[in-house]
């Protein structure tokens, strides 16, 4: 019976492998991991099923699920214990990554030595070193005084899950280096280590291309280091859909392996070497080249996936097995998932495998031959259409110019610039003048392509934005795409449009008439809130700006608005000029249409008017009233714009950073008219605000607090939280619950606020109970 099952497994190997991958994927959907005994029990049960007839697929699904659970439990054990947070620790270890330069410091991964492991700290941590910091190099050994915390990031609808990224990369804690005499370099980097080699190469590339605008792109193509790419360059790549070309990924490693394979075949044929079958020897050389390129990219997770894929293909050639393309793709999919079950969390995992699968579907079994350019055009069309639902799901936007941009960029940057950059980098380590000349030539080539990409990027309307499709719509979208890409003559191809329709037509739940939806976003130690009525949107504050490459406006606020299919902001209110409230405004104004802007500091917000008490307007049955400030423009906390929004079922009060003086004036001016169901607590729950008189005047049912996780100010203050609770208000904190959403509608009144961590968090995300 067992032999019969293995025979059936070979006959249906692709579905069997996909079933195991489905089990691995299912494990990543769990909000919490089950008890430790569940995974072994699943494995035993799967073994029993495997012995039975026609139960191979569920058996492999359960085996994949069991393996993913075991892997996840082991990775969860690597997280920093809660008791170790806020503790000053002395660690010894190695700088495990190229340090990234920030506005006021550097960031790097630190791999702990056995000496530090005794402290029960995760082996790999991510550290920041601010203000007075030394020059760090990858591979150096250091002793550092640090303060750590568990992995914790912003958690919002449509936003990037930083905790998932840290979890997948094996980073068990984040923190910063404390000023302390104990901080010292213990040993220089080994001259033969990969980290030291990457550091030397990176430093030389930046030096020989100093002043060249494309030096960051060259470094990214040569060794996968993207820190030198400016935010403006990322914007061009994003708008043209060509960002995949500068990240060492499956296409790059596959290209190098393919070029090496065919070059090795030619060399072996020229010399007539017959000690080993030429294809097998060429495949071994190609696999070695892919391994070297992966090492140059510091074995980043995307490159590990690509290396496994190359190993599967080249291994088939070495053992002289004629694998079908679809079988090879499924085998690579299973191999990558089995080696790292967390790989399925990355959008790049699905985009790369989907792109290869689409190309195989488009070329396999077709009778018509096509030329090079016709083939490239077809591949661009196939991948642009086929990846459309996934791009919407992961990024809420699709570049409409991407097929044309990639048609130009892939042959030049992918097939010419990458080998050129690699050759120049290798020569640079041996002979700097020659290597410098080669890299300069590569930079000029990239610069020429870049002028075209910049022109494309500046074209209006080249991005189509839409709310992410619901997961169930992909069940219809995938066969719909396959129908549309099927050969001509297949009946019913037009049905593909109908199957694809749900992915682009199903929108988020609308706000009911005369209702209101308030979302207090999780922006750390700052504030950003979105008020939605049936047909209008108001943004109150925009969070902080952390440097030229990162701010809340682009990283959190825009992503949330797109996830709710909001393409225009009807009003932007910036309460005052502190960075944690105004920092993301410029990015929002650049990326979204904003009809009206108001602020207490209008001179710092282009085109803004002054907010002041007495301003009123109505949208969709909701009344908006500005309660403060009362005087001229100013930048103090007490000059914050204070906005009250009232609907038939209740009201919300948004307060900025007002403190005692402004609260007292509001109480004297409005008295009981301040009463509101929902209050965004002033000044993040600071002791300088939320006075007893103010809380008593507002008498909120819910107090929402926007605060950073383990922020250095200790906010919200315990006394303030207790004051709200004694007044009968339920208190909700973004640091614990992520984005907070509350609805008010005429039929049901105030709905209980919901925290995004509780409703959408997965097992790796921190929860209030942790």
Image (cartoon, grey):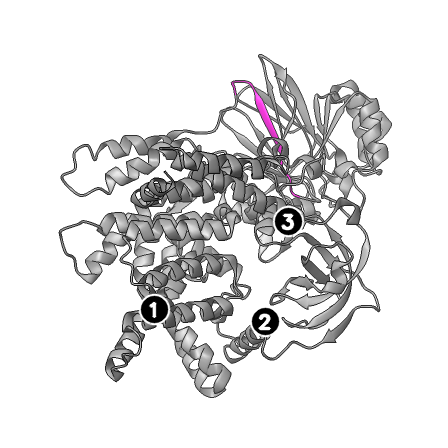
Q: Position of residue 414 (x, y in %)?
A: 36, 65
Q: Which residue is the site of mark 2?
A: 195
Q: Which residue is the site of mark 1?
A: 283
- In primary-sequence order, the first of circles 3 and 2 is 2
Q: Residue at x 59, y 48 (%)?
A: 162
- In primary-sequence order, the first of circles 2 and 1 is 2
Q: Residue at x 42, y 57 (%)?
A: 244
- In primary-sequence order, the first of circles 1 and 3 is 1
Q: Which residue is the site of mark 3?
A: 583
Whole-number angstrom distance, CA of label 2 to CA of label 1? 27 Å
In which quadrant of the rendered image does the C terminus lie? top right
Residue in the foreground of this view, choosing between 306 and 651: 306
Whole-number angstrom distance, CA of label 3 to CA of label 2? 36 Å
Q: Magenta segment: does it hold 134? A: no
> Magenta region: which residues?
512-523
Q: Position of residue 463 (x, y in %)?
A: 39, 46
Secondary structure beneath dot 2 equals helix
């Amino acid at each position: 019976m067992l032999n019969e099952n293995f025979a059936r497994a070979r006959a249906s190997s692709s579905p069997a492998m996909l079933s195991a991958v489905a089990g691995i994927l299912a494990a990543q959907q769990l909000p919490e991991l089950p008890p430790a005994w569940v995974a072994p029990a699943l494995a035993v049960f799967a073994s029993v099923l495997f012995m039975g007839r026609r139960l191979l697929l569920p058996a492999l699904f359960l085996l994949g699920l069991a393996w993913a659970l075991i892997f996840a439990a082991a990775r969860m054990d690597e997280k920093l214990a809660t008791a170790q947070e806020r503790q000053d620790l002395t660690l010894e270890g190695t700088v495990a990554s190229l340090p990234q330069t920030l506005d006021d410091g550097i960031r790097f991964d630190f791999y702990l030595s056995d000496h530090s492991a005794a402290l029960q700290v995760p082996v790999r941590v991510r550290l920041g070193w601010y203000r007075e910091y030394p020059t760090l190099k990858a591979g150096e050994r250091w002793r550092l005084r640090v303060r750590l915390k568990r992995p914790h990031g912003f958690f919002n609808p449509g936003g990037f899950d930083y905790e998932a990224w840290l979890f997948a990369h094996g980073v068990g804690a984040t923190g910063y280096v404390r000023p302390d005499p104990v901080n010292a370099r213990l040993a220089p980097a080994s001259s033969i280590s990969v980290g030291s080699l990457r550091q030397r190469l990176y430093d030389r590339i930046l030096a020989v291309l100093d002043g060249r605008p494309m030096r960051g792109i060259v470094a990214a193509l040569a060794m996968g280091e993207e820190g030198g790419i400016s935010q403006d360059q990322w914007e061009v790549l994003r708008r043209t859909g060509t960002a995949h070309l500068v990240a060492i990924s499956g296409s790059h490693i596959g290209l190098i392996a393919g070029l090496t394979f065919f070059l090795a075949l030619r060399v072996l044929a020229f010399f007539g070497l017959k000690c080993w079958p030429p294809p097998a020897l060429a495949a071994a050389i190609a696999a070695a080249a892919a391994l070297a390129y992966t090492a140059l990219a510091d074995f980043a997770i995307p490159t590990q996936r690509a290396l496994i894929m190359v190993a599967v293909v080249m291994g088939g050639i070495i053992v002289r097995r004629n694998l079908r393309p679809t079988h090879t793709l499924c085998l690579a999919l299973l191999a990558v998932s089995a080696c790292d079950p967390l790989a399925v969390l990355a959008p790049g995992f699905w985009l790369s495998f989907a792109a290869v699968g689409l190309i195989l579907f488009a070329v396999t079994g077709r009778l018509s031959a096509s030329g090079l350019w016709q083939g490239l055009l077809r591949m661009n069309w196939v991948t642009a259409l086929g990846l459309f639902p996934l791009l919407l799901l992961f990024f809420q936007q699709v570049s409409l110019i991407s097929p044309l941009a990639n048609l130009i960029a892939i042959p030049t940057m992918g097939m010419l610039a990458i080998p050129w950059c690699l050759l120049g980098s290798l020569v640079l380590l041996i002979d700097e003048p020659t290597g410098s000349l080669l890299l300069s030539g590569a930079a000029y080539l990239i610069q020429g392509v870049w002028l075209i990409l910049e022109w494309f990027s500046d074209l209006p309307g080249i991005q189509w934005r839409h709310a992410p499709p619901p997961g169930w719509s992909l069940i219809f979208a995938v066969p719909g795409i396959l129908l549309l890409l099927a050969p001509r003559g297949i009946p019913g191809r037009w049905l593909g449009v109908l199957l694809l329709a749900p992915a682009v037509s199903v929108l988020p739940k609308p706000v009911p008439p005369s209702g209101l939806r308030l979302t207090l976003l999780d922006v750390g130690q700052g504030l950003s809130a979105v008020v939605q009525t049936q047909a209008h949107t108001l943004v109150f504050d925009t969070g902080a700006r952390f440097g030229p490459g990162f701010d809340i406006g682009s990283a959190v606020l825009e992503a949330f608005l797109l996830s709710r299919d909001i393409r225009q902001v009807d009003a932007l209110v910036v309460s005052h000029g502190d960075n944690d409230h105004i920092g993301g405004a410029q990015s929002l104004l650049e990326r979204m249409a904003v009809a009206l802007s108001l602020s207490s500091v209008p001179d710092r917000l282009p085109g803004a008017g002054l907010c002041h008490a007495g301003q009123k307007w109505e949208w969709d049955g909701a009344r908006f009233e500005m309660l403060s400030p009362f005087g001229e423009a100013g930048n103090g906390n007490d000059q914050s714009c204070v906005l009250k929004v009232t609907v038939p079922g209740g009201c919300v009060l948004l307060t900025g950073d007002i403190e005692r003086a402004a609260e007292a004036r509001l109480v004297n001016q409005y008295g009981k008219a301040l009463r509101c169901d929902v209050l965004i607590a002033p000044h993040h729950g600071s002791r300088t605000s939320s006075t007893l008189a103010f809380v008593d005047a507002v008498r909120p049912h819910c107090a929402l607090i926007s605060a950073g996780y383990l922020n250095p100010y200790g906010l919200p203050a315990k006394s303030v939280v207790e004051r709200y609770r004694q007044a009968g208000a339920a208190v909700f904190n973004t640091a614990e619950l992520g984005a907070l959403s509350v609805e008010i509608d005429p039929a049901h009144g105030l709905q209980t606020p919901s925290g995004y961590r509780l409703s959408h968090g997965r097992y790796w995300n921190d929860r209030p109970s942790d």
